[in-house]
Image (cartoon, rainbow, N blue to C red):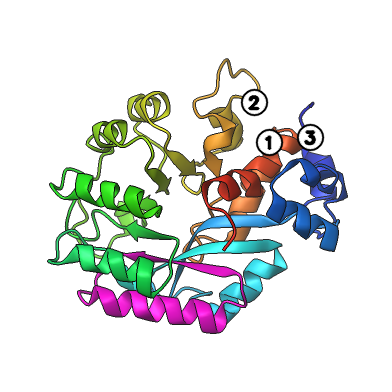
Amino acid sequence: MPPIARREFLKTSLLTGAAVSLATHVSAATKGGAERSRANPQAPGIIDTNVNLFNWPFRKLKYSDTTALVRKLKKHHVIEAWAGSFEALLHKDINGVNERLAAECREKGEGLLRPFGTVNLAWPDWEEDVRRCHEVFKMPGVRIYPGYQPFDLSHADLPKLVAITQERGLLLQIVFGLEDPRVHHPLIKVANVTVDPLVPILKKLPQARVELLHFSGNAAGTDLQQLMTQTSTTIDFSHWEGNGGIGRMIGTAPGSTAARIPVERVMFGSHAPYFPLETAILKLIESPASSAQLLAMMQGNARRLLPPA
């Protein structure tokens, strides 16, 4: 299909609530999206794979209140959001973090939020936290924050964590660089986290489901190439900056000769509420892509990775 012109898509975008031209293609997407389209054919829904609840430790965010965040997500036709917790960054009581997240999603999520608990490989008995996330809190996956949590991807227990999530059928989300290091609080020394140690682990555990959040790769693109050619990792686009950033990554931008990332491995991720939700939507609008590609990134790829609850 030919790319959708930016002006045409703006007229029928999610921001206006009248995406009629895209809705005709929802039937070719996943079951969840098709059901949404039949219910409201003018609003193909989004699955946002990267949001966090509660307070960012270093400044007040506009949508740190869960009720306000859910209202914002619904306004822009987000039909499902995978939610971690900002408390996971600095709290040592990990079970308390996960318990509060599960309760918040259940009580205030209005059926939209799916909680992703956390484990901290630097603390003892993290395996029990994985078990409780899965068996007690009924979470579909867990999320780790290397760099903020005091470990990186060379940690000796990371292969064990990947193996456990594979065995339990959980999705493992790995979060990179939540904040630009130039605006870090001076007392916070967040180590630079590289993806290199992850590649051999995933090669040994090919059935593990892993998504990288807020990741764009190094300047040379070598780590991204390794991930795409040697693993089945998926990546959200919350950290892809610049005009036409998505188009450059999936190979649809003018002058592109090849995709750096297959479109079927690209996930919608807003990094809300740290980033405005509209930022992620505008990235879709201003990047050349067919309606099928847009729908894949909006919901189809996420639904294949994580079926409905």
Residue highlighted by disc 1? 293
User: Contact (CB < 8 A) between labels 3 and 1?
Assistant: no
Res. 54 image quadrant? bottom left
The residues colored magenta run 89-118
Counting from the top left corner in percent of width and height, residue 32 is at 69, 55
Spatial CA distance of label 3 from label 1 is: 10 Å
Quadrant of the image occupied by residue 250: top right
Q: Is 95 contained in the magenta span? A: yes
The outermost residue toward the bottom is 107
User: Measured from the top left, where is residue 27 in percent x and y?
Assistant: 80, 45
> Seen in the image, is 291 located left or right of residue 224?
right
The reply to whether callout 2 and callout 3 are in contact (CB within 8 Å) is: no
Is residue 153 shown above or below 197? Answer: below
Q: Is residue 113 left or right of residue 222?
A: right
Mark 3: which secondary structure?
loop
Q: Secondary structure at mark 2?
A: loop
Q: What residue do we see at 36% from left, 34% from top?
A: 206
Disc ID at residue 252: 2
Three-letter code, disc 3? Ile
State the residue at coordinates (53%, 52%).
Answer: 306
Which residue is denoted by mark 3 in the rendering?
A: 4
Foreground residue, 119 or 306? 306
Q: Amino acid at mark 2?
A: Thr
Q: Residue at x 77, y 52 (%)?
A: 34
Image vertical order of residue 236 relative to residue 232, above or below: below
Magenta span has 219? no
What amino acid is labelled 1 in the image?
A: Gln
Q: Classify 10 Å Cα crowding around label 2: few (below 14), some (14-19), many (20 and above).
A: many
Q: Secondary structure at mark 1?
A: helix
The answer to whether 235 appears left or right of 159 in the picture is right
x and y, in percent, of residue 181 in the image? 30, 53
- How far is mark 2 from mark 1, CA to CA? 10 Å
